[in-house]
Image: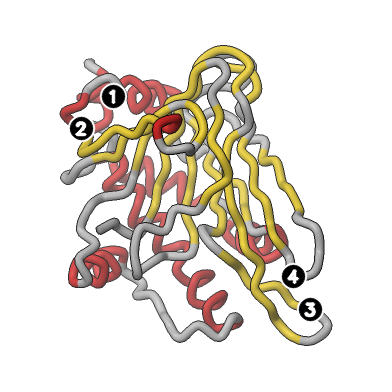
């Protein structure tokens, strides 16, 4: 079976089962404590390879970004066009539904008067009604020497405060280096860095912009950015699942 066909042939029950067996209570605790959480085994190795292979086929994408041209780092990425490949179209709303409760709880704690519907389709309607109609799921590709500067994926007025990155390559076999990195800027304190050791098929859920932290004088916001350290050898592909669309 061709790689592209494999993406469209994944049964939704497989994805539903993998999402269901994640320890979501632990994931919520990790998100609250660190701003990120491991989601192990979201994709099977053959699915990872099939998605990575799609990078060469521009028919699936609406745009290509070369990071060095914009000061974003080195490497490149492509944004998928609608309709999304079936695998991503099935996985995106399932992850959103699991994370919407955290998003609502965080906004309430930070005094942000925005709530998110349980259904991802309903949230996308909100984005599209505001002119944010471009799909944001993307594939990233890095070669030796490439890296991704610390950044935030905002794209417009309507922002879902969590996103998921899924590693499609295997560390130690396909590449060396290229660690996923988060930094947290805390008021009147030095920034804190977190390196997340993902394997092929694992996802990491993390804060897009900020998250609440309990302090001695109440809850305050900390600002987060994410990136990828320099790839020392090989090639690395990642699927980025962003839940809000772009203008």
Q: Tag on residue 187?
A: 4
Q: Tag on residue 215?
A: 3
Q: Quadrant of residue 10?
A: top left
Q: Secondary structure at mark 4?
A: loop
Q: Secondary structure at mark 1?
A: helix
Q: Position of residue 138 (x, y in %)?
A: 35, 40
Pair 2/4: label in front: 4
Cβ–Cβ under 8 Å for marks 4 and 1: no
Precedes in sequence: disc 4 or disc 1: 1
Q: Position of residue 39 (x, y in %)?
A: 56, 46
Would you say 237 lies left or right of 127 here? right
Q: Position of residue 162 (x, y in %)?
A: 49, 60
Q: Secondary structure at mark 3?
A: strand
Pair 4/3: label in front: 4
Precedes in sequence: disc 4 or disc 3: 4
Cβ–Cβ under 8 Å for marks 1 and 2: yes
What residue sits 53% from the left and 70% below the top? 102
Vertically, is 204 above or below 96?
above
What residue sits 69% from the left and 57% below the top? 184
* Mark 2 vs mark 3, CA separation in Å: 46 Å
* Mark 3 vs mark 1, CA separation in Å: 46 Å
Precedes in sequence: disc 2 or disc 3: 2
Pair 3/1: label in front: 3
Precedes in sequence: disc 1 or disc 2: 1
What residue sits 44% from the left and 68% below the top? 100
Query: What residue is disc 2 on?
Result: 60
Precedes in sequence: disc 3 or disc 1: 1
Q: Residues within 10 Å of mark 2 (few under 14, many from 20)?
A: some
Query: What residue is disc 1 on?
Result: 54
Q: Quadrant of residue 87?
A: top left
């Amino acid at each position: 079976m061709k790689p592209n066909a494999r993406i469209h042939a994944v049964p939704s029950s497989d994805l539903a089962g993998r999402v269901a067996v994640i320890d979501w209570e632990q994931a919520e605790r990790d998100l609250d404590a660190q701003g990120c959480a491991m989601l192990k085994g979201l994709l099977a190795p053959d699915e990872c390879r099939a998605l990575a292979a799609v990078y060469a086929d521009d028919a699936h994408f609406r745009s290509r970004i070369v990071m060095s041209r914009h000061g974003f780092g080195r490497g490149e990425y492509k944004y998928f066009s609608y309709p999304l490949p079936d695998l991503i179209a099935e996985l995106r709303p399932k992850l959103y539904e699991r994370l919407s409760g955290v998003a609502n709880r965080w906004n309430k704690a930070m005094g942000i008067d925005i709530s998110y519907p349980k259904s991802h389709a309903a949230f996308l309607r909100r984005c599209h009604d505001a002119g944010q109609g471009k799909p944001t799921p993307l594939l990233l590709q890095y070669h030796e020497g490439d890296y991704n500067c610390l950044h935030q994926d905002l794209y417009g007025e309507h922002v879902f405060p969590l996103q998921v990155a899924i590693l499609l390559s295997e560390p130690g076999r396909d590449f060396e280096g290229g660690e996923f990195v988060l930094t947290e800027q805390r008021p009147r304190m030095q920034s804190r860095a977190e390196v997340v050791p993902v394997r092929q098929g694992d996802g990491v859920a993390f804060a897009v912009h900020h998250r609440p932290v309990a302090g001695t004088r109440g809850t305050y916001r900390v600002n987060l950015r994410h990136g990828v350290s320099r790839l020392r050898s090989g090639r690395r592909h990642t699927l980025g699942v962003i839940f809000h669309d772009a203008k």
